[in-house]
Amino acid sequence: MANYRLKGFRKPPTDHYSRPYFQDLEQRFKTMNMRCVGSDVQHKHWLRYAREFVDSYKDTPRFGLMHHCVYSHDDINLIGIVDDDFSEWLRSMKSDGLLEDTILIVMADHGHRFAKLRDTHQGQLEERLPFYSFALPNALKLTEKGKKMFENLKVNKNRLTSPFDIHQTLHDIIEMPDDLTTEQDLGTRSLSIFRPIPSSRNCDQAGIAPHWCTCLDWTDAMKTENDKKLSTEIAEAIVQAFNEQIKHELAICSPLKLKEIEYAKKLIPKDSLLAYKTVLDKDGFVPDFSGNTKASHAHYQIKLKTSPGRGVYEVTVLFDFNTRHLTLDLASVSHVSQYGDDPHCIIDRNYFLATYCVCYDKI
């Protein structure tokens, strides 16, 4: 079965591959406008499947990944339907001893991308900071290594981590390291959250592009007329880059035009940093701020609308003030409006172009 935006697998990649079954159910939901399996709502069926998997292999080393988004993907309110059932599922799993030898991870892959909340700063942060929690079994926490892993986990909850770190964390679960006290090397992108992560870690060291980093101090890039002019120039260049992606499909996809800039932010060194020239005393405590260094480049983050269609994008670029060159990573483009049926003509030909394509019959 095909996976979202990916080719999928010719053969099931796991011992139990539930996607074809639940995908069939979701197709029925669309045609029948319902979310039930027999007399049960779908999420109860999903929770029961997860419990049966753990129970069936309670004496066997196992790994399971269950993902559910029927309620939460397009609506921020419906997820509340699951709260009581999910809480009861966790309680029963614990009380029945099914979590005694299990590390349980409850997570989201991202925050909301399409609801009205996404238009707020809070929504933007939530998209980039999804929920992630670990529960360790008591039997592990009572061991010498498990106790230290749990202590590190509690400290690291206030350190910068990313989804890349889960890779090394899973390795540490498979084979626990001997050294659980030495801080990990910041030059390595994937760090285990069961071992000390340096408090000085930044987005660049963690492999987080500026577009996704929530630790940066962005400033308004629409304050002055010069700011507006440059932001518009950059926005026009971004739209031109979108059109480059669909230039071979113009027989079915309409070229895009810049309709509106919703906001523009820039990330440049602080004035005090640019003004710093040297020190005035031999001990280096008195700074000389008579310098006139100019920033050579800056990151810009622009939220823009295009026409025709209803495209709304958030894009982060690196702009060189000297060469006027723009560096755009298309992998860091957020399409924050729903496509609807606008790109239907390109879906089967090239799904990745759906981000930029508006079919002529939808104009």
Image (spheres, grey):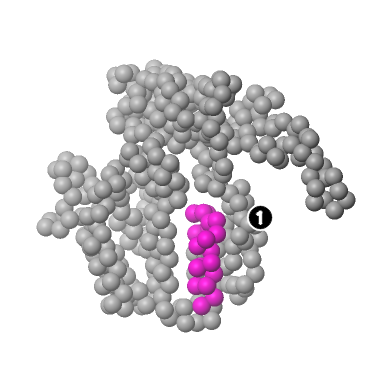
Q: How many marks?
A: 1
What residue is at 53 percent from the left and 64 percent from the top? 156
What residue is at 55 percent from the left and 39 percent from the top? 218
Compared to residue 123, the image places residue 249 above or below, namely above
Residue 166 lies in magenta, yes or no? yes
Q: Residue 234, can we see it? A: no
Q: Position of residue 247 (x, y in %)?
A: 47, 21
Question: Along the line of sight, which residue is nearer the eye, 80 or 268?
Answer: 268
Residue that sits furthest to the right in the current view? 282
Element type at mark 1: loop
Q: Position of residue 279 (x, y in %)?
A: 83, 45
Q: Position of residue 357 (x, y in %)?
A: 39, 26
Q: Residue 286, can we see it? A: yes
Q: Position of residue 55 (x, y in %)?
A: 29, 73
Tell me where the magenta segment starts and ends, as one range. 147-168
> What amino acid is found at the position of numbered circle 1 in the picture?
Gly
Query: Residue 124 lies in what quarter of the image?
Result: top left
Q: Is residue 52 left or right of residue 28?
A: right
Q: Main secondary structure of the magenta part?
A: helix
Residue 339 lies in magenta, yes or no? no
Question: Along the line of sight, which residue is nearer the eye, 83 or 184?
Answer: 83
Query: Residue 99 lies in what quarter of the image?
Result: bottom left
What residue is at 68 percent from the left and 36 percent from the top? 271
